[in-house]
Image: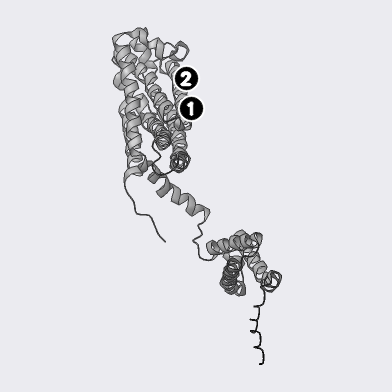
Amino acid sequence: MIPAAPPARALDAPSFSASRFRAEREADWIAFDLLLTKLEKKGAKALTSDELLQLPLLYRATLSSLSIARATSLDKALLDHLKALSIRGYFLVYGVRETRWNRVRRFFLYDWPAAVRSVWKETIIISLIILLGAITSYSLVASNPEWYYNFVGEDMAGGRDPRATREFLQSTLGHGKAAGEGESGLHIFATYLFTHNSRVSIMSFALGFAFGVPTMMLEYYQGIGLGAMMAVFAGKGLGFDFGGWLFIHGTTELFAAALSGAAGLRIGAAVVFPGARSRLQAASHAGRTAGKVMIGVILMLFMAGLLEGFGRQLITDTMLRYGIGTLMLLFWIGYYYIPRREDVT
């Protein structure tokens, strides 16, 4: 009996050679990397016609190499390199590249107003807190003038306190014969008020992570000095004039203060109520929106400083001051809250 032949062995499939794979395709990767670098540094205008035609071909070749590398489990370093190269290629070949001017334009037309609109609830809350601080100090000083010295330091008051005469207080608003002398004194208070509000605004935002509590306390404090000073001028029958002196720049400055508090409160609310995210993720997401708001706040404070330093000193008519302040308030409301359709081209 002839013994049965042993079963034939299956031929081994040729093993995949990583070094051969790299040798055959690395030239394309290098060429693609050089074209992307040139495109990033100098733009599409720097590429020749042949290079522009090569770009999508080399991109597809790189994607093919990445697909093979994933299927054959090549070394991680090569896999990461091909991934990074493919991502760069996607954004440079198919992505929309904006110029610096377009990015700035997009921020001012869409990103900044959209960020402010997203914190409208927090803005209302902070505005009410500032108003509550002003009403509290106004009521206390109006009922008992001695409270004034607890809210406004004597060095900052500079004589603008309950003991001052009506004529002196009127002169500090830019009216009367002694206007030049008295106005410089009130200018010190205005500079102090602007510096104070700017510092408190930044602190309100920075301390928002502490559950928003320090933010609300600081914003309440924002209105304290303002209400106390208003009570002094109103007590001498100059409340309307003082309101005009403040209104010309105050609508911008106090709006900025409310937005800074709203930005801080948004972060605090995200920490307290993170939802499905972790607290760190929620705070990070809220921080991106709040950061856009704060860039705008800095610009608003700068504009308020210009209105304070020039507009209010050059314009002494009370009704005109109210008019400019009202126009600024309407401008900010319209800029932030009137919806607009974003360009897609």
Q: Which residue is mark 2?
A: 188
Looking at the picture, how far across and down is residue 60, in whole percent?
Answer: 56, 71
- Residue at left 41%, top 39%? 274
Of residues 321 and 56, the one nearer the viewer is 56
Image-quadrant location for residue 304:
top left
Q: Is residue 84 left or right of residue 289?
A: right
Q: Quadrant of residue 242?
A: top left
At a point 36% along the width and 24% down the height, the residue shown is 245
Residue 36 pos. (x, y %): 61, 64
Q: Which mark, residue 22?
A: none
Farthest-out residue, bottom: 1
The amino acid marked with disc number 2 is Ile
Residue on which disc 1 sits: 199
Q: Is residue 71 left or right of residue 210?
A: right
**Residue 50 lies in quadrant:** bottom right
Quadrant in which the N terminus is drawn: bottom right
Residue 195 higher or lower than 107, as above or below = above
Work out whether mark 1 precedes mark 2 in sequence or the reverse, and give the earlier one. 2
In the displayed structure, 152 sits above or below 305; it is: above
Of all residues shown, which one is farthest toward the front?
A: 1
Residue 15 or residue 27, whichever sits in front: 15
Q: Residues within 10 Å of mark 1 (few under 14, many from 20)?
A: few
